[in-house]
Image (cartoon, grey):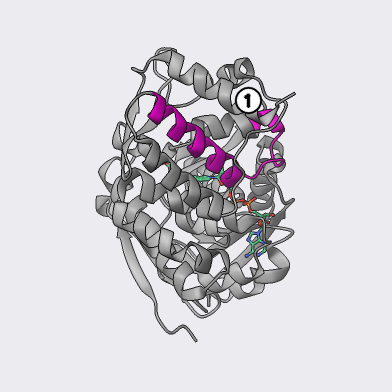
Amino acid sequence: MPEVVRELEVGLGERSYPIRIGHGLLGSEDLTGFVTGDRVMIVTNDTVAPLYLEKAKACFPGKRVDSVVLPDGEQHKDWQTLNLVFDALLTHRHSRSTTLVALGGGVIGDMAGFAAACYQRGVAFIQIPTTLLSQVDSSVGGKTGINHPLGKNMVGAFHQPRAVLIDTDTLLTLPQRELPAGLAEVIKYGLIRDLPFLDWLETNIKALADRDPAALAEAIYRSCACKAEVVSEDEREGGLRAILNLGHTFGHAIETHAGYGQWLHGEAVGTGMLMALDMSVRLGMLSENDRQRARNLILRAGLPEWPPGDISPARFLDLMAVDKKNVAGALRLVLLRDLGEATVTSEFDSRALDATLAYYCCAANPG
Ligand code: NAD
Ligand code: GLY
């Protein structure tokens, strides 16, 4: 039975929704209050289904629950796989009053959310994230979508869930490589907006890497609190929300270059944040001491320091030109003015960017 359930709210007026965090929630929480009609379609994948599908079904007593099991992997975050969700909904005759449930990591959350945004012009959905990354980031805030071969997350919609249920017990089955990937997004919150949290992370990073349940629950709570605050202030990324993309412009370029699924999203964000920190120092915005402090934390989390050895500065620039933050062709980057204080700007000396790219590409490929 769950011992402690902590709850936060994403404040969006009549579309506000709760984030419930605790252990043992899957199977014991009743989520029927968030279901519009009498039918539910759980969207999951072939890795997560054997672990958690039956427990997830138990969250909807009295409802007719169907499920669709997608192939696992970032390389399947595409139209073809998305269509399997519509196939299932139509085959089982789901109407506009159905509720979709995303059960899995960020890939499933983004795809199920996008399917919910599109199906019959929009139906309700619930997030049950099962990776650290999805629990601290992708399940909150309503960004949904799929990848295009030419750019990451380039097709999608804003569509908020009705509720987010985070069962921290699911992290016990997470493959080892996925943990640092989630920690990258956790560290991001400390760097962009929450210096006390960054201090806390420096003390607790080993406990987190060792999957200490109390440390993970605290990190998830504080990350979700930070994200909920930002999303409540700027739901559709008119301004502030862009800071949540620290390291992502570099990171998306790495993911696209390497081929979706080769680098984990969180790994690419970790390296991308190191590149953004480096550039912030070159622009005179951040001290070298602070960069080293942040770098140590990112590396202690187990994240990679260098981009792939075969990516050139020119290729980086080409891929970074396809970014949703760019305005009128100008590259906009999230940089740090200080630890705990991010800024989004297109007004930077491009020589700093060139120097960062040259440094990281050269170090990654010394030959
Ligand atoms: P993922 O969804 O690919 O999950 C990682 C792996 O873990 C997969 O193989 C998955 O099947 C498996 N898995 C999931 N839960 C498990 C569990 N409890 N036990 C064992 N295995 C489990 O990757 P992710 O890191 O969760 O998400 C990355 C995706 O999220 C990217 O596509 C990224 O673009 C997206 N994202 C979206 C947002 C947003 O705001 N919408 C934010 C950040 C990232
Ligand atoms: N992960 C970035 C955002 O939700 O805005």
Residue drawn at point x = 36 percent, y = 19 percent: 346
Horizontal side of residue 303 vs 233, given as left or right: right
- Closer to us: 363 or 327: 363
Q: Which span of residues is magenta-colored?
A: 256-282
Find residue 53 and report its horizontal and vertical position in percent: 65, 68
Question: Does any portion of residue 163 appear in the rendered image?
Answer: no
Q: Main secondary structure of the magenta part?
A: helix
- How many numbered marks, from 0 up? 1
Q: Which amino acid type corresponds to the residue marked 1 in the rendered image?
A: Cys
* Membership of 191 in magenta stretch: no
Find residue 173 and report its horizontal and vertical position in percent: 66, 69
Q: Is the residue marked 1 within 8 Å of ligand 1, measured from its CB?
A: no
The relative height of residue 23 versus residue 232 in the rendered view (above or below) is below
- Closer to us: 296 or 159: 296
User: Which residue is most to the front?
Assistant: 289
- Closer to us: 229 or 255: 255
Find residue 352 and report its horizontal and vertical position in percent: 44, 19
Q: Quadrant of residue 220?
A: bottom left
The relative height of residue 354 versus residue 308 in the rendered view (above or below) is above
Horizontal side of residue 341 vs 334, given as left or right: left
Question: Does any portion of residue 178 appear in the rendered image?
Answer: yes
Residue that numbered label 1 is attached to: 361
Residue drawn at point x = 58 percent, y = 51 percent: 181
Q: Residues within 10 Å of mark 1 (few under 14, many from 20)?
A: many
Residue drawn at point x = 60 percent, y = 53 percent: 302
Find residue 188 and report its horizontal and vertical position in percent: 43, 47
Question: Considering the image in quadrants, where does the C terminus appear?
Answer: top right
- The kind of secondary structure element at disc 1 is helix
Q: Quadrant of residue 337?
A: top left
* Membership of 260 in magenta stretch: yes
The relative height of residue 174 versus residue 80 in the rendered view (above or below) is below
